[in-house]
Image: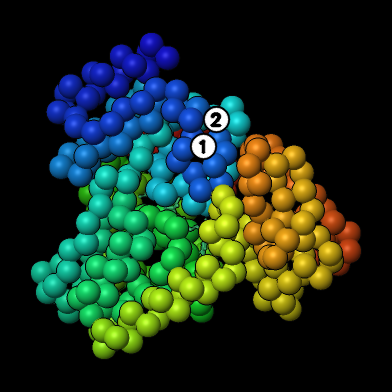
Amino acid sequence: MNRLREFLEKINTKVGFSGLVRYDEPMALHTTFRVGGPADVWVQADAAVFPDYAAALLRAAADEAIPVFILGHGANLVVPDTGLRGIVLDTGAWAGVMSGANAVSGTAPALRIRSGTEVDAAVEAAAQEGAGALAFLAGMPASIGGAVYMNARCYGRSVSDTLIEVEILDEAFQRTIVPFRPEDYGYKKSPFQNRAALILSATFRPEPRPLAEIWLEIEAHRQDRERKGHYRFPSAGSVFKNNRAFGKPTGQIIDELGLCGLGFGGAEVAPWHGNIIINTGTATAADIRALVDELISRVHAALGITLEPEILFVPPHSPVIAA
Ligand SMILES: Cc1cc2nc3c(=O)[nH]c(=O)nc-3n(C[C@H](O)[C@H](O)[C@H](O)COP(=O)(O)OP(=O)(O)OC[C@H]3O[C@@H](n4cnc5c(N)ncnc54)[C@H](O)[C@@H]3O)c2cc1C
């Protein structure tokens, strides 16, 4: 830990860091499941220094083989009870929406959004500009970076349906624009899942629509999520991916097998929704893992199909981002 402290103090002085640093930070505070042991160190750099700081930090960490985990809103994560080794870099302060003709040179007015921006804040900022592109994401707990990384999907649309380009810190720690190519994206898949890159911002087509229509859509989605019990207990939304080959939504499959309410420790399949696992108050990451494994095994035994988790079980050591 002393090595990490010295490492961080050296980098932070060199780059002129401003922001928050916490040692032994419980990750349960940073995940919507509210589980996860301590990160050796959690760092949230202010927006004024974020890209330069992130580049310097990632480069130096790679040189010293220190793992760095990039944290968005923590809405799709199961962090181990033993916590995370190395550094957690929280993007949360790197927030803001730039819009207008200059947001992306040479193209129509677009929305460029920093990766740490809360999805709901981005949805509202876009709506105020008359841009309807992001309304489908209303009410989804996430950062823009996490939504792009996961290619989040809801109400029949995916993030990739409206993406123009993504700015990243690439594997050589350079700011690089990655233009959207449809072949790189799929159901809950983005090219960033196979890269050691930090998403800095994403640029979206605005899809102008009448303001009232956009706000109606936003409200409808928020109310629908409320009705479906998304916010009743800590969770990470859908646990398993849907699969057309199954013929019906995964939640319905689990429900029809009578597995709603199945529990393991403090983790329970939501009694009202087969594809949501809730933390009833005392769940550990191990409880969630055990329940997920139990569901996979019971569904396989009953129907011969294999459910694929959508939630990410974070390894205790992230891969070291290397040039
Ligand atoms: C109540 C609820 C409802 C939900 N509903 C939906 C839904 O309808 N549809 C859906 O698709 N998902 C849904 N989710 C899941 C979650 O919102 C999405 O998976 C979302 O995309 C996660 O974003 P995040 O910022 O929380 O990412 P995190 O959970 O913080 O991280 C996810 C992954 O992205 C990586 N990452 C995050 N930011 C960056 C970055 N800037 N650069 C590089 N990598 C990064 C992380 O390292 C990690 O590997 C729901 C979750 C909850 C709690």
Establish whether ligand 1 lies closer than 8 Å to the Cβ of label 2: no
Packing grade of label 2 (10 A; few <14, some 14-19, many >=20) is many
On residue 37, which mark appears? 2
Nearest to the observer: residue 22 or residue 316 = 22
Identity of the residue drawn at 40% across and 34% down: 88
Q: Is residue 116 visible?
A: yes
Q: Is residue 275 left or right of residue 28?
A: right
Quadrant that contains the N terminus = top left
Identity of the residue drawn at 77% across and 61% down: 260
On residue 220, which mark appears? none
SS at badge 1? helix
- Residue that lies at the very extreme toward the top in this rendered image: 2
Which is more N-terminal, label 2 or label 1?
A: 1
Question: Which amino acid, by three-letter code, is at mark 2?
Answer: Gly
User: Is residue 251 positioned above or below 177 on the image?
Assistant: below
Quadrant location of residue 146?
A: bottom left
Identity of the residue drawn at 36% across and 61% down: 119
Packing grade of label 1 (10 A; few <14, some 14-19, many >=20) is many
Residue picked out by circle 1:
28
Quadrant location of residue 253?
A: bottom right
Q: Is residue 65 visible?
A: no
Question: Which amino acid, by three-letter code, is at mark 1?
Answer: Ala
Kindly check if marks 1 and 2 are in contact, taking CB atoms under 8 A apart as contact. yes
- Tell me how far mark 1 sits from mark 2, CA to CA: 7 Å
Q: Position of residue 83 (x, y in %)?
A: 54, 29
User: Is residue 294 positioned above or below 211 on the image?
Assistant: above
SS at badge 2? loop
